Image (cartoon, rainbow, N blue to C red):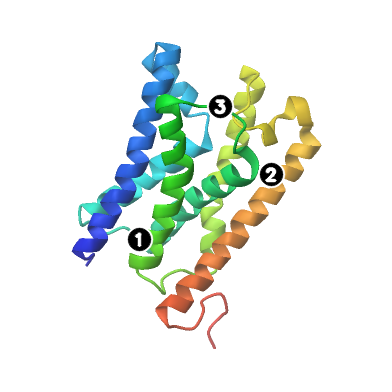
Amino acid sequence: MTTGIARIGAAIVASTALTGVAIQFDATLAQTGSVGQTLWTLLRFFTIWANIIVVITFGPIALGRHVSPRRVGGAVLAILLVGIDYGLLLRGLLSLSGGALVADTLLHKVTPIVAPLWWIAFARKGRLGRRDPWIWAIFPAAYLPYALLRGMAEGHYAYPFINVTKLGIGQVAINALLIATGFVLAGYMMVWIDGRLSGRPSRLRPTR
């Protein structure tokens, strides 16, 4: 049973992500003038997908529904990747103002902080295992070919570190491998933290 304060916290997390997506939608709509084009543009970005996953994961928790620890962990790790990649690779590349700046702050900075904090404070611990980081990695692994195909077809890549035209496929492959490795390692760190906070033996090792 999720406590009242945990549900309130989950509502804050979901609302933060949803508000960021909504403001970004409005800012993009002002540029495109088309709802369909706005949706297509936004769904180019891993950031938007990750924040949507946060909404559909934490929203049910806020309503008192059961969400598996694996699903929560995957959502938290995905949005954490957004925050880390933004801080290391994307910060300052665009000059933003108004709604776009507010959305950028919520999507790339606030949600990647509040979601992991909720997980540390309220998520049920001791339920994650060695396979989970690889299961979580399916999402970014599926996103990469989607983003590359869209970039090649449209001539505009979602992120500069996957720009095949400028970097070449070899460098993009290296970049993707480095990010994927960091993602999986961060996933194992989450599993380790999960075990430590639960007070149980780490599930990174087989039980004897």
Mark 2 or mark 3: whose residue is earlier in sequence: 3
- Quickly name the residue at label 2: 176
Q: Position of residue 173 (x, y in %)?
A: 74, 41
Three-letter residue code for mark 3: Ser
Q: Residue at x 43, y 21 (%)?
A: 28
Instruction: Determine the secondary structure under disc 3.
Output: loop
Q: Position of residue 207 (x, y in %)?
A: 53, 84
Q: Residues within 10 Å of mark 2 (few under 14, many from 20)?
A: some
The reply to whether the C-beta atoms of the residues labelled 1 and 3 are less than 8 Å apart is: no
Three-letter residue code for mark 2: Ala
Instruction: Determine the secondary structure under disc 2.
Output: helix
Q: Quadrant of the N terminus?
A: bottom left
- Quickly name the residue at label 3: 95
The reply to whether the C-beta atoms of the residues labelled 2 and 1 are less than 8 Å apart is: no
Q: Residues within 10 Å of mark 3 (few under 14, many from 20)?
A: few
Q: Position of residue 166 (x, y in %)?
A: 76, 26
Gap in angstroms between the C-alphas marked 2 and 3: 26 Å
Three-letter residue code for mark 1: Ser
Q: Quadrant of the C terminus?
A: bottom right
Q: Nearer the viewer, residue 128 or 199?
A: 199
Q: Residue at x 55, y 60 (%)?
A: 133
- Quickly name the residue at label 1: 68
Front position among marks 2 and 1: 2
Which labelled disc corresponds to residue 119? none
Q: Nearer the viewer, residue 147 or 182?
A: 182
Instruction: Determine the secondary structure under disc 1.
Output: loop
Left or right position of 165 against 59:
right
Q: Is residue 168 above or below residue 177?
A: above
Left or right position of 196 against 34:
right
Q: Position of residue 114 (x, y in %)?
A: 39, 53
Gap in angstroms between the C-alphas marked 2 and 1: 28 Å
Mark 1 or mark 3: whose residue is earlier in sequence: 1
